[in-house]
Image (cartoon, rainbow, N blue to C red):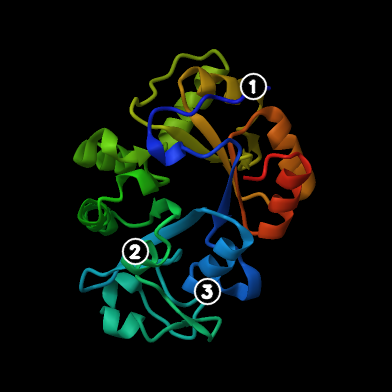
């Protein structure tokens, strides 16, 4: 299947398919740490996926969960703790949580897919992107369609956005020939292959997305066979925890860039 030509937004100026390092990869359990992203960069990745929360004093932290409990040696809700406390937590007992602005600075060539995990992180993220003039380097996503739509309204077309759940549903319905409203302004749709037992990504879905000028990025795929099937379906990007496997699959096809 022929893949979509990249829309006008410079965030997508990479030959398709795009390999994304999901949370920087999960080697040694060090997800969403500077160490993980360094390893991803050394492996050849230039598209990173991460999540952001804000601390009680407004610092924007790259971290997936609302609480520190699952992967760090500290407990508590990030939104209720000052950065002075959050900064002492160690992922897997080893690595500190990074501020997102520090990641932007450390990896100046990287493109970031940023999942806004909490409402309070939205405006600080947009303000950071504005200060750093990083419009070409950021794509904002969220499960909340309202949240990504608000991000687009606040920043305009300078900011690349994907769809939330409601937008994905509308696109899926349209791919099945069912009329549904779909927000304009997004540059990509980022989805799991299957959600709650319901298949989302198939040729019809990819075809509908491409007809609207949207790239299709699928998360989170760690199996080589599934990667190959998705690539054959025409998807434009894959997010993975297993950096070496995706690199091998793309290299074997001659499309690792």
From mark 2 to mark 1, how far is it between C-alphas?
37 Å
What's the residue at 52%, 74% (across, down)?
A: 35
From mark 3 to mark 2, how far is it between C-alphas?
19 Å
- Element at label 2: strand
Q: Which residue is mark 1?
A: 2
Q: Nearer the viewer, mark 3 or mark 2?
A: 3
How far across and down, in percent of the image, does residue 154 sit?
A: 20, 41
What's the residue at 45%, 66% (across, down)?
A: 65
Q: Is residue 225 left or right of residue 12?
A: right
Asked if one can make out residue 138 in the rendered structure from this viewpoint, the answer is no
Give 171 or 5, whichever is nearer the viewer: 5
Which class describes the residues within 10 Å of circle 3: few (<14), some (14-19), or many (20+)?
some
Which class describes the residues within 10 Å of circle 1: few (<14), some (14-19), or many (20+)?
few
How far across and down, in percent of the image, does residue 94 sit?
A: 53, 85
- Element at label 3: helix
Q: Is residue 164 left or right of residue 218?
A: left
- 109 versus 204 height, above or below: below
Tag 1 near tag 3, CB within 8 Å: no
Of callouts 1 and 3, which one flags the residue occurring earlier in the amino acid sequence?
Answer: 1
- Res 166 label: none
- 64 versus 201 height, above or below: below
Of callouts 2 and 1, which one flags the residue occurring earlier in the amino acid sequence?
Answer: 1
- 45 versus 89 height, above or below: above
How far across and down, in percent of the image, does residue 46 sit?
A: 52, 53
Asked if one can make out residue 201 in the rendered structure from this viewpoint, the answer is yes
Considering the image in quadrants, where does the N terminus appear? top right
Q: Which residue is mark 2?
A: 53
Tag 2 near tag 1, CB within 8 Å: no
- Element at label 1: loop
Q: Which residue is mark 3?
A: 35
How far across and down, in percent of the image, does residue 72 sit?
A: 49, 80
């Amino acid at each position: 299947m022929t893949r979509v030509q990249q829309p006008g937004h410079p965030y997508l100026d990479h030959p398709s398919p795009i390999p994304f390092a999901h949370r920087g990869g999960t080697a040694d359990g060090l997800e969403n740490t500077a160490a993980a992203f360094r390893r991803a960069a050394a492996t050849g990745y230039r598209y990173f996926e991460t999540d952001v929360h804000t601390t009680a004093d407004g610092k924007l932290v790259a971290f997936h969960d609302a609480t520190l409990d699952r992967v760090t040696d500290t407990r508590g809700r990030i939104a209720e703790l000052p950065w002075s406390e959050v900064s002492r937590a160690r992922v897997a007992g080893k690595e500190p949580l990074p501020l997102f602005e520090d990641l932007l600075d450390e990896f100046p060539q990287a493109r970031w897919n940023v999942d806004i995990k909490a409402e309070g992180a939205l405006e600080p993220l947009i303000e950071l992107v504005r200060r750093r003039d990083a419009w070409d380097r950021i794509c904002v996503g969220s499960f909340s369609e309202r949240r990504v739509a608000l991000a687009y309204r606040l920043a305009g077309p300078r900011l690349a956005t994907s769809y939330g759940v409601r937008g994905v549903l509308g696109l899926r319905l349209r791919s099945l020939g069912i009329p549904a409203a779909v927000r304009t302004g997004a540059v990509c749709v980022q989805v799991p292959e299957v959600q709650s037992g319901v298949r989302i990504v198939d040729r019809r879905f990819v075809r509908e997305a491409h007809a609207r000028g949207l790239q299709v990025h699928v998360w989170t795929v760690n199996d080589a066979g599934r990667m190959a099937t998705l690539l054959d379906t025409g998807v434009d990007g894959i997010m993975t925890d297993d950096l070496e496997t995706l690199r091998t699959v793309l290299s074997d096809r001659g499309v690792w860039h």
